[in-house]
Image (cartoon, rainbow, N blue to C red):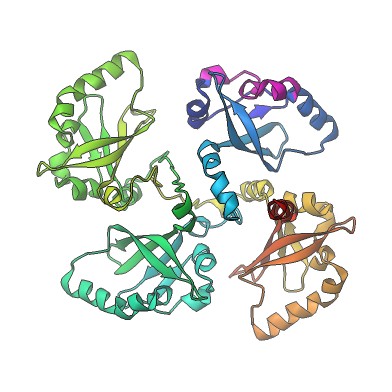
Amino acid sequence: VIDENCIIQMVNRKSCEDFGWTKDEFVGQNISMIMTVDIAANHDSYMKNYLSTRVKKMIGTQRQVTARRKDGSTFPCTLGLSETPNGEFYCGFIRDLTQQKKSDSEMLEKNKELIRNESLVRGILDASSHALFVIDERCTIKMVNDRSCEVFGWTKEEFLGNNINMIMPAHIAMHHDQYMKNFLKTGIKKMIGTQREVTACRKDGTTFPCMLDLSEAKGSGLICGFIRDRTNQKVAEMALAKKNKSLQEKQDIMAGILDASFHALFVINEKCIIQMVNEKSCVVFGWRKDEFIGKNINMIMPSDIAVHHDQYMKQYLETGVKRMIGTQREVTAQRKDGTTFPCVLGLSETQQSGMICGFIRDLTEEKAHEAKIIEKQLAAEKLSCDLEANQGIIMGILDAAFHALFVIDEKCIIHMVNKRSCDVFGWTKEEFIGKNIKMIMPAHVAVNHDQYMKHYLDTGIKKMIGTQREVTACRKDGTTFPCVLGLSETPQSGMICGFIRDLTKDKAAQAALTTK
């Protein structure tokens, strides 16, 4: 986060890990310190030009650039910039593309489109990159997310109330109800609590490989399944790593989240004494919670490591040099029965309590299934429960979105737009509000639009709502451009919400690839 003088005001831990400077070395310095020499020399003048003209060239976009580390080495990255509503500060997110660049040649040959986030300000389930299904003991689908519809091709209405075997190949689907019946009768879990690669079937009949994670919601009798499409990973495995940054303040909610985790959790103090574990720790290692609490963490280590572990902690406390904390490393762990297994250990230090938190991901099945998975998602994203209580925050998020947003009523009158809508179409918010949405449509479409809405209100038949479709939009200056339109209906208000993603650059990129 920088000010209008390009001076760094704030960085996160990932910035220090990626670039090599400490937070103290960052704060108060010019942001050009992370740029290559040819860019750094001109950066202040770019900012000065923006402040005088307010013409946004980088702000509100994502662009691939080259960044420089403390040791002078450079790396490719994606830079996304946004401006705070008061215009005082500028926020940049940098994603390291080094690993992605290694697989670019194969991706170009197979002409695969990158998966893009559709919209911000959605529920955590609909924002998930994985398809979600919740079924009951009769295998009836009770819940799906937007990603499920995108991956499989059915709408939510087509999913809900139907048997989950609709997404399975025929030779699996014919036996699935019997598998559930056997589980309910015997209680033996073969798939629940595991990860397994399976084949799924879309609405059009095509199949694709995916990773299926199943867990049982305690007390509800429901089965929750996350499905991760592995089509692109078959070409080049791209595992995402996410750090668990904070625990819920309320103990009961926190314990529920931790116990629902797929990874074992240990929290120890500076004397290496275990203060907290989750249920997965008990499942993986074989001890009960009461057998863990109060014991030295070296109980889960092979003897050749355990004998030195207290000395490692003592050395860290005396020197402050972090070798394992803040990293992920593959190690060997030991169960209660004396057997050992490979795992990924991720350590972090809680800033206020001084406790060390370790997440352990069992690699036994992954080692048998594939050579190596680099990283796996550590924690589910959290749903913000206070968005509606603060309209200012909501509008700030909407205005920071990369896609244009329109909210209209049943008479096609615009009630809300975001800042991106103004940037894309050229009208101000005041010019939009109260006008008919057909103002952004070409004439031959605009003349019929009110009739389309009337037909929907009369019949309830959804042709566009709940789908994404490529259409043509019209700017204030009369020029048109290709875009993807996604429509949804808000259940309580009856408003129609539309997100518009400009495809101009995508079309140009596709044309360039075709030419090559």
Residue 458 falls in image quadrant: bottom right
Residue segment shown in magenta: 24-42
Which one is in front, 436 or 508?
Answer: 508
Q: Would you say residue 389 is visible in this rendering?
A: no
Which one is in front, 110 or 431?
Answer: 110
Which one is in front, 280 or 306?
Answer: 306
Q: Most extreme residue toward the left, as rendered?
A: 337
Q: Decide if residue 69 is on the left or right side of residue 268.
A: right
Q: Is residue 427 above or below residue 467?
A: above
Asked if residue 336 is among those painted magenta in the image, a careful observer would answer no
Q: Residue at x 53, y 71 (%)?
A: 153
Q: Decide if residue 499 is on the left or right side of residue 388.
A: right
Q: Residue at x 68, y 20 (%)?
A: 37
Please provide percent x and percent y for residue 184: 22, 73
Please provide percent x and percent y for residue 362: 27, 46
Q: Is residue 61 above or below residue 465?
A: above
Numbered label tally: 0
Q: Most extreme residue toward the front, as rendered?
A: 516
Q: Would you say residue 67 is visible in this rendering?
A: yes
Which one is in front, 393 or 159?
Answer: 159
Residue 272 falls in image quadrant: top left
Quarter of the image that includes the N terminus: top right
Provide the major secondary structure of the magenta segment. Answer: helix
Q: Most extreme residue toward the top, as rendered?
A: 319
Asked if residue 40 is among those painted magenta in the image, a careful observer would answer yes
Q: Decide if residue 484 is on the left or right side of residue 157.
A: right
Q: Residue at x 9, y 44 (%)?
A: 337
Please provide percent x and percent y for residue 190: 23, 64
Please provide percent x and percent y for residue 291: 12, 41
Q: Is residue 422 above or below residue 455?
A: above
Q: Decide if residue 15 is on the left or right side of residue 311.
A: right
